[in-house]
Amino acid sequence: MKKYVEQPEREWLRVSAPELRVVDEGLWESAHRRLREAKATYLAPTADHPGGRPPSSAGGSK
């Protein structure tokens, strides 16, 4: 039976294989930009603590 030995990241072999992409680079960058913006929106009013809500523009309670 083979035993898994975790290798340090500095020893990893990285090979570029764009033909294996499921999502093209432009869409990937756009999605991650949107995720960064959403994270900033939701964490800013809660002092960077997850689980808070962004300020309500509807004027509701809380």
Image (tube, helix red, strand yellow):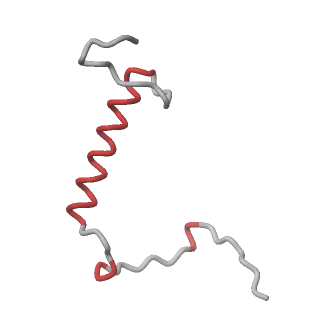
- Considering only vertical position in the picture, is 9 above or below 42? below
Task: Give residue 52's position: percent from left, percent from top.
Answer: 45, 25
- Considering only vertical position in the picture, is 44 above or below 31? above
User: Looking at the figure, which quarter contains the C terminus?
Assistant: top left
Question: How many discs appear?
Answer: 0
- Considering only vertical position in the picture, is 1 above or below 52? below
Task: Give residue 43's position: percent from left, percent from top.
Answer: 41, 29
Q: In the image, what residue occupies the spot 50% across and 78% down?
A: 13
Give whichever of 24, 52 is nearer the camera: 52
Q: In the image, what residue occupies the spot 31% across and 51% down?
A: 32
Q: For the view shown, which residue lies furthest in the bottom direction?
A: 1
Task: Give residue 60's position: percent from left, percent from top.
Answer: 31, 13
Task: Give residue 27's position: percent from left, percent from top.
Answer: 22, 61
Asked where in the image residue 47 lies, by quadrant, the reply is top left
Asked where in the image residue 38 lies, by quadrant, the reply is top left
Q: In the image, what residue occupies the spot 37% across and 30% down?
A: 42
Name the side, left or right, on which 47 lies relative to 12. Answer: left
Q: For the view shown, which residue lies furthest in the front direction?
A: 60
User: Looking at the figure, which quarter contains the N terminus?
Assistant: bottom right
- Considering only vertical position in the picture, is 44 above or below 60? below
Q: For the view shown, which residue lies furthest in the right direction?
A: 1
